[in-house]
Image (cartoon, rainbow, N blue to C red):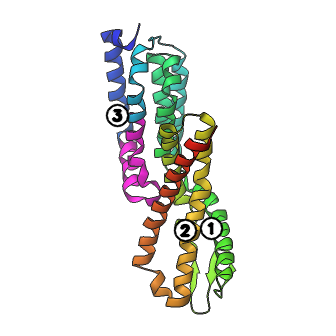
Amino acid sequence: MTILQSSKFQIGLLVALILGIIGVYAGIFQNLYADWMNDPNYSHGLLVPLISAYFIWQKKDELTSLPVKPANSGLVLILFAVVVLIAGVAAQEYFTKRVSVVFLLAGMVVFLLGWQWLKSLLLPIGFLFFMIPLPYIIYDAMAFPLKLFVAKFSVIALKLMGVIVWREGNIIMFPQTVLEVADACSGLRSLMSLLALGVALAVFSQKKRSAMVFLVLLTIPIAILTNMIRVIGTGFLAQYYGAAAAEGFFHEFAGMGVFLLAMVLLFVSSGVLRKVWS
């Protein structure tokens, strides 16, 4: 039996479960949407479900021919999702509550449609993890060493350019001003968005799985490199034109420019990989 031959009962059960999820997760989704709108680190989150839906649309011919073999073992995944949700509610921990919905969707697919369906939908469902903000304790633990790394090598580059500069941790000091390499300049903010974009681009543009993995891994050095360029440019302006020249409009424009540069590098890398990867 295929999905087109599914009984009205199964379709009705699916609709009921979807409505139940909306009811249970309404508040969680509302807070998640607020984070997408207000947290620059996760402004890409709004696009993630749309890209995931497009992944499913691309597989529509394959999915309509898959046999529907509901598996009770899917209840294990559903139960696990419920336990994760309860733990998140009890601890008032947003990440745990939000991530439970991904496991719940996986369990529903297995319970209603079977394991073959989960195998085919693993990418669209797994891609939804990119829409969920990391816990800040993890975010801060990753951002701090990245700030030090960016500050260290940006100072080396500035010295090679003849700029008088020295560094203390993530603080860059010039004779007339002091700059701080903040979280936004660590590369982690753009890395979150680039990883999601990199996965989508890898699936759309690369034919070999090894090339897909390599392209996704390339997002890490690209994000760090482009943010180093931002810090170097800011430091250069601060040295020769004063701190005011490196703040305000330039600082905001540099943030957008750096991300656009990262996207260009990612697309160029994708094109090169398609030509040279064997």
Q: Which residue is mark 2?
A: 185
Q: Which residue is mark 3?
A: 22
Magenta stretch mostly in which secondary structure?
helix
Spot the residue most to the front. Answer: 275
Q: Spatial distance from mark 2 to mark 1, Cα to Cα?
A: 7 Å
Q: Is residue 49 above or below residue 34?
A: above
Question: Which quarter of the figure is the C terminus placed in?
Answer: top right
Whether residue 30 appears in magenta in the rendering, the answer is yes
What segment is highlighted magenta in the picture?
A: 27-53
Residue placed most toward the observer, 148 or 272: 272
Q: Quadrant of residue 59?
A: top left
Q: Spatial distance from mark 1 to mark 3, Cα to Cα?
A: 39 Å
Q: Which mark is residue 71?
A: none
Sequence-wise, the earlier of marks 1 and 3 is 3
| Residue type, label 1 | Lys
| Residue 138 x/y as whole percent | 60, 54
| Residue 190 x/y as whole percent | 51, 58
Asked which secondary structure carries label 2, the reply is helix
Q: Is residue 244 above or below residue 32?
A: below
Residue for point 53% across, 23% down: 119
Q: Spatial distance from mark 3 to mark 2, Cα to Cα?
A: 37 Å
Spot the residue most to the bottom. Answer: 176
Asked which secondary structure carries label 3, the reply is helix
Q: Which mark is residue 147?
A: 1
Q: Quadrant of residue 23?
A: top left
